[in-house]
Structure formats: structure tokens, C-alpha cells
Image: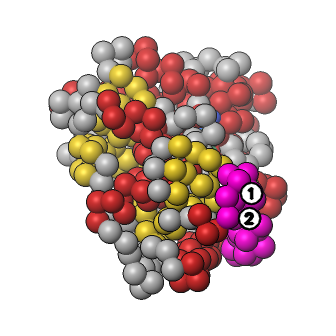
Amino acid sequence: MIVLGIESTCDETGCAIVRNGIEILSNVVASQIDLHDTYGGVVPELACRRHVDVIIPIIQRALEEANLSLRDVDLISVAHGPGLIGALLIGLNTAKALSLALKKPLIGVNHVEAHLYAALMPHLQAMPFPSLGVVLSGGHTALVLVKGIGDYQLIGQTIDDAIGEAYDKVAKMMGLPYPGGPHIEQLAKEGDANRYPFRPGQIKNHPYNMSFSGLKTAVLYAVKGVGGRQEKAAPEQDKPHIAASFQEAALGGVVSRAIRAAEEHGCHSLVFGGGVTNNRRLRALVSDSAPHLSAYWPSKGLELDNAAMIAGLGYHTYLRRGADTLALEAVTRIGW
Ligand code: KG4
Ligand code: ZN
């Protein structure tokens, strides 16, 4: 089955062609980093305009690279949430138009679930379920018990910022470009993670929930000084130490919870998804602190938002529950 996937939940426009949920024939992504860099974050109105401009050429390129035409497509899969409403509508309405014109079935998938699928994709036959899923992206941070594709139980999640969002905001405070994650990671390499006593947030009576806003404020006070008092601001040469201390607190809090949750729920593996999985310190922390658990990471090129994970997951979702109708709606939030 040839699946055409469409991704437009935030600031990447993607189209991919995937055979039988696993074989990626093409995976084209147009990033909008240049557009949002000046603002230090995604501007929804600008994101939507860019999606409209590029979505058709991106679909054409994905077909060309796969050496296929629209007639060869058996299923249209689209991320119908969660995400920015305007951005979602552009991908969803394009998918509906294709489905209607080609008389091919339409399936809507959950973008966050697809991030986990990006790591499961090559291992599905031999995957030891249950696995503890760890979503670490710019919009979501969650621990999820994965009993199989489409069978999940939420274990914990952030109650405020997502971890990637915290990276981006901390980077902005330090005058680093958007998106900030890779820049913080780079700066942290030269820093001492023990220099600043930052701590990950704890939520009373919810050991698996997470919070990053207190940590972000602690970094703000360190960078700018308490109450904006210049004399209390950290000296320029401390920035690598701040980056390293922030990173260790943010990643450490997630990794320790993920390991505890995996042990409590009888999981022998961890499966990671989302843009923050690009971070090498995260991967080292996981292999150092959980040698007894197998860790599954997204294949190269599938860490950040992409449509291959949407097409791949769409295949399984369609086989499990059949097609959606053209009444499928864009949803800004989806529960587990
Ligand atoms: O999964 P993704 O592409 O988008 C969402 O679905 O949100 O993730 C983007 C996020 C951004 O916040 C970015 O700063 C973060 O992933 N990121 C990183 C790294 N590379 C990307 N965070 C930490 N370290 C990195 N190397
Ligand atoms: Zn994403």
C-alpha cells in the first residue's frame, strides 16, 4: 500500500511517500526557520501563509522523488492535530481535496503519536511491548505507556512548557537564534553543569508529571539578574555554565522519571520521539543511567517534524480502524 503523508502542524511543511508503513520512498520537508528566526518563535499567521505557498510544490517533489504519480497513491494520511489551528487546516484541507479528487481513502493521525512511531518504524516486528514512550518536542513532553501501535496510556506530562519550548526560551534569553535547542546543546559542551544549582520542577502527588517554567525563570534570573538588576546578572563567560546547568536539570528530570516509570510498568525498553531527541547529551544520559533498558530512537532525519512518520502511522491506523470521512476535523489538542 502506497501512502502519501502530509504534515503541517507547526512550522514545517512536509510530504512523504511510504510503502506499507515502513519503506520511505521520499520524505520532503520545507522548514520555516528563516521566517521565524527574527521573532525568536513561531508566528502562526506567517507559518500559515508559508504552508499555503509551499504545500503543492512539496507534494509534487515528494511524488517525483518517489518516482510515482498521484494515481499510484492508495491512501492519504494527514496529521490533523495537535498543532496550530490555521496550519493544521491547510494540511487537512489539502489532504481532503486529494482524497476527494483521487477517490482514495483519507486517514487522520495524531502528530505526537507519529513522533513515537518514527522510532518504532524499523523495529515493529520484533518490538518488545509494552515500552515506555518519551515524547520530547517543541510542543509536547509526555511519558506514555505504549502497549502497541494505537494502544497507549498517559503516565505523565508537563503541566506548563514543553521541554523543547524551554530550550527555545532559554536560548532567546541568551541571545541565541531560533530554534534554540541545538545552540544550547552546543554552548553547554563548554560549560560546567554543576556551576548553577538549577533543579527540574516537581509536582506534588504526581511523580511523573513535569514542569519547566520554574527552571526557565531560574535561568532568567541567572542571565539577567533578579528583578532585572544588572549587577546581579551572570557575566558573559558564565553562559556556557548556565546552558550546561539548564540542560542537565531539564534532561535529568525527564530521564529519571522515564526510567522509574518503565520499571514500575514492566517495560524493558524506552522509545523516544520529538525534536529534542537530536540532543547527544540526552542519548548519553539514557545509555549511562539505563543500561538495563533498550532505547529506541527515531531514524536519522525523522527526529524533527516530517511527513514520513505521518504516512507510516497512517498505514497502521487505516488497517486498524478504516478510513475517516471528509468530516474529519483539525484539533489543536488530542488526549491519549
Ligand atoms: O518535534 P519538533 O520538530 O517539533 C514539535 O513537534 O514541536 O521539535 C522541535 C523542538 C524545538 O523546540 C527545538 O529547539 C528542539 O526540538 N531541538 C532540540 C535539539 N534539536 C532540536 N532541543 C535540544 N537539543 C537539540 N539538539
Ligand atoms: Zn512535532
| Dot 2: element | helix
Q: Which class describes the residues within 10 Å of circle 1: few (<14), some (14-19), or many (20+)?
A: few
Q: How far from the left and from the top, in percent, is residue 204?
A: 25, 45
Q: Where are the magenta residues, as a range?
A: 45-69
Residue under the image location 73 percent in, 71 percent down? 56
Residue under the image location 42 percent in, 85 percent down? 327
**If the image is split into quadrants, where does the C terminus sit?**
bottom left
Amino acid type at image mark 2: Gln
Residue under the image location 51 percent in, 24 percent down? 283
Residue under the image location 51 percent in, 19 percent down? 284
Mark drawn on residue 64: 1
Frontmost residue, 97 versus 180: 97
Q: Are marks 1 and 2 in contact (CB under 8 Å)?
A: yes
Mark drawn on residue 60: 2
**View extreme (front): residue:** 71
Q: How far from the left and from the top, in percent, is residue 210?
A: 37, 45
Amino acid type at image mark 1: Glu
Frontmost residue, 30 versus 157: 30
Q: Is residue 297 at least partly visible in the picture?
A: yes
Residue 109 drawn above or below residue 225? below
